[in-house]
Amino acid sequence: MSIRATAPVFRATCARRVAQPLQPLRNPALRRRFATGAGPEVPPPSPPRKSNSPYALVAVGAAALGAAYLFFGTSGSAKDTAKELGSAARGAAASVEGKVGLRRGKDEYQKVYDRIADSLEVEGYDDGSLAPVLIRLAWHASGTYDKNDKTGGSNYATMRFKPEAEHGANNGLNVARDHMEKIKKEFPWISYGDLWTLGGVAAVQESGGPTIPWRPGRIDGFEHNVTPDGRLPDASKAEDHLRFIFNRMGWVEIRLPAFNDQEIVALSGAHAMGRCHPDRSGFEGPWTFSPVTFSNEYFNLLINEPWVWRKWKGPAQYEDKKTRSLMMLPTDMALVKDKSFRKYAEKYAKSEDEFFKDFSAAFSKLLELGVPESQWAGEPWAMGSQ
């Protein structure tokens, strides 16, 4: 069976999705067809206050205090101090924009979403869609957060810089970054962090997945904000490694606990999309027969198909015993071998509704890692194609 032949024609015969309410999720049949039924509008952020002046003055004062602290309270070079001041100023500006309503409205971000959605189909690239690599870009740009020192996450979009772009886990993401750079030129006002995460949301939803709550507020940082290598999951490791990586992430300002086992398994379900490339990760092959469709098929295959070690010269990976055309990574098989992980994998294999619900919440949470609460303009939106 040809994998490419079995992959669905990406949105060719399907109407694009319409903005949906966050709850409840659509039924499975409608998801497959990228629902066209309209739902109640998600309320926009709170309207701006009548006077912006007091908030502007507060921001100026806060920035001045921050500048004084950084200048007199750090031991770094003048250049490093200037960079820190730049990051602090951008953060203060974003906070003020959120408070006084200066940030662009949902309709402006919807235009960006629509442009991303229109650009997903690329003939000749993998299975005909950029959606899988855009999901990976959003994931890897956000999953570097460390709750211990509050560095990393989606706030600074530090994969723009060579040191982080060259991390082993980010091999091949230049394809996604280069593609999104074209869209950035059309909408120069959007931050890279907001653009990349919105791209991940569009990729999931336009591929038949659930609605992902999303909101703007991220700022662009500097090269000195780059995170160290090794913060993303290593596909060759087992369950203990997965828990270590996800527990390190936690949540911005330690407001909520770290990712639990259920969320780890739900996020792993993104492997329903795309394939591995020997020239990127070293591994090879797709996880499912429909690598451009977001579904619970990854869990169905993981639980119900027999898997054996693949005999080849590449890194250790599994292949399905029947067709020898699909693959699973050691971290995928950890979801079956670990008792706690397995109960969630079995749950998602049986119910796509449950998987979609839990993935939506966990992915939205992941995309907000590293962003101070003060930078958000309001509650998350439900974005969708018109």
Image: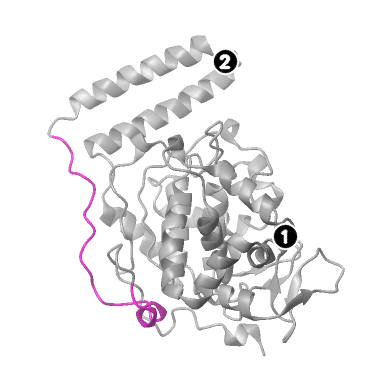
Q: Which quadrant of the figure has residue 5?
A: bottom right
Neighbor class of circle 1 (other Cα within 10 Å; few <14, some 14-19, many 20+) is some
Residue 208 locus on image (x, y percent): 43, 74
CA distance separating discs 1 and 2: 39 Å
Side of 56 where 289 appears, left or right: right
Q: Position of residue 106 (x, y in %)?
A: 27, 54
Q: Earlier in the sequence, mark 1 or mark 2?
A: 2
Q: Residue 309 location in percent, x, y?
A: 80, 73
Q: Compared with residue 362, is residue 376 higher up or lower down, i.e. above or below? A: above
Question: Where does label 2 land, which residue?
Answer: 78
Q: Is residue 4 above or below residue 202?
A: below
x 50%, y 39%: residue: 156
Q: Which residues are magenta?
A: 26-49
Residue beneath disc 1: 281
In the image, 386: left or right of 189?
left
Instruction: Looking at the picture, tell me which residue is in the foreground, 309 or 378.
Output: 309
Label 2 amino acid?
Answer: Ala
Name above or below for residue 321 compared with residue 275: below
Name the image quarter holding residue 160: top right
Q: Inspect the magenta stretch and tell me whether residue 270 lies in it.
A: no
Residue at 44% x, 79% y is 11
Q: Secondary structure at mark 2?
A: helix
Extreme residue in the top direction: 72
SS class, disc 1: loop
Amino acid type at mark 1: Ser
Q: What residue is drawn where x is 35% and y is 77%?
A: 27
